[in-house]
Amino acid sequence: MTDLEAKKNQFHQYVKSLQNEITAELFKADAKLSLEEDLWERKDHKGNPGGGGITRAFTGDVIENAGVNTSLVFGAIDPAFAGKLGGTGDEMWAAGISLIIHPKNPRVPTIHANFRMIHAGEKFWFGGGADLTPYYPHEEDFRYFHSTWKNALTPYGCYEKMKKECDQYFMNTHRNNEMRGIGGFFFDHFNTQDLENDIAMIKNISSYFIPSYFPLVEKRKDEKYDSEDEDFQLHRHGRYVEFNLLHDRGTMFGLRTNGRTDSILISLPARAKFSYKYKPKTGSVHEKMMEYYFPREWN
């Protein structure tokens, strides 16, 4: 086994261990949580065995719906898509974890994160990130989230770049550049040519996910909320759906590589709402919240 193959296997084992850690945290946060786990397999573009994954779908009292998924996929891919992937040749290998948590209480933010490694022909790289979508203007929580990731990324000299990439990526350009949430960090095609250090970096960064988010869940999950809070949350869920179906590269990657559709679309909220020309009430906290869905400095 070459060093690259050994590191690929190491990375795959790591994301599965992270999946278990996050699963444990979800059960701590929600005493009524239920889990449905599926082990799935896929065929590659030529119909040959091409790996699969572990999908974990959660529902509960605190967590309305969530998915914490890992996958290891390989083999032939559509040549038309291969040209857009950024590698070489018509085969690829990819392993990673992708998760989305949609809480029931609108005072608790939604979160998304993923960490992956891709090898295509002569090239390999890492990608991922985490971003927060809150529905209530708890600015201290937003600063906490961003400061956690700044602490994670600053030692590697890439916080500002990855923060900016996140602001620009998770954006509904068809909605006058309104962001899906309040950002976080995002990176793709990351490769410093030092495989050992890159894997160590991704493992270290991803370890910050649990402390970046679950303290906010504990802090807010028992807060009272009203019908206006819920209505605003459901409309923002609608914007979340718009981004995921119109712009998200991860959704497209999964579908174009013959991924498992239900595992890919588990990122969508269980409930969403659309109203023609929707606007929150003038002077409400929800109108105030709308101001945060645009890039800003947090630290």
Image (cartoon, helix red, strand yellow):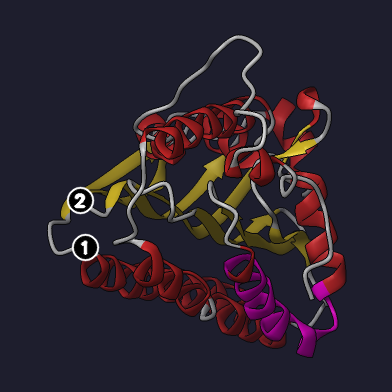
> In the image, is 95 to the left or to the right of 250?
left
Q: Are marks 1 and 2 in contact (CB under 8 Å)?
A: yes
Nearest the eye: 15 or 32: 32
Percent from the top left, x then y, of residue 87?
A: 77, 49
- Nearest the camera: 135 or 89? 135
User: Which residue: 64% across, 60% down?
Assistant: 128
One can see residue 48 in this view = no
Residue 287 spot, x, y in % from top left: 66, 37
Please rate how many residues cluster around mark 2, counting C-alpha atoms within 10 Å: few if below 14, some from 14 to 19, many from 20.
some
Left or right, 69 with reference to 157: left
Where residue 62 sits: x, y (%)?
A: 26, 54
Within 10 Å of the Cα at label 1, are there few (<14), some (14-19), or many (20+) other Cα atoms? Answer: some
Could you tell me which residue is drawn at 61 percent across and 75 percent down? 144
Q: Earlier in the sequence, mark 1 or mark 2?
A: 1
Q: Secondary structure at mark 1?
A: loop
Q: Badge 1 is on which residue? A: 30
The residue under label 2 is 61
- Residue at position x 51%, y 59% in the image: 95
At label 2, the amino acid type is: Asp
Residue 199 picture quarter: bottom right
108 vs 179: above or below: below
Type of amino acid under label 1: Asp
Horizontally, is 113 left or right of 228 in the view? right
Residue 188 visible: yes
Q: Residue furthest front?
A: 283
- Magenta part of the chain: 141-159
Label 1 to label 2: alpha-carbon separation: 7 Å
The disc at residue 296 is none
- Where residue 227 sits in the image (x, y, percent)? 37, 33
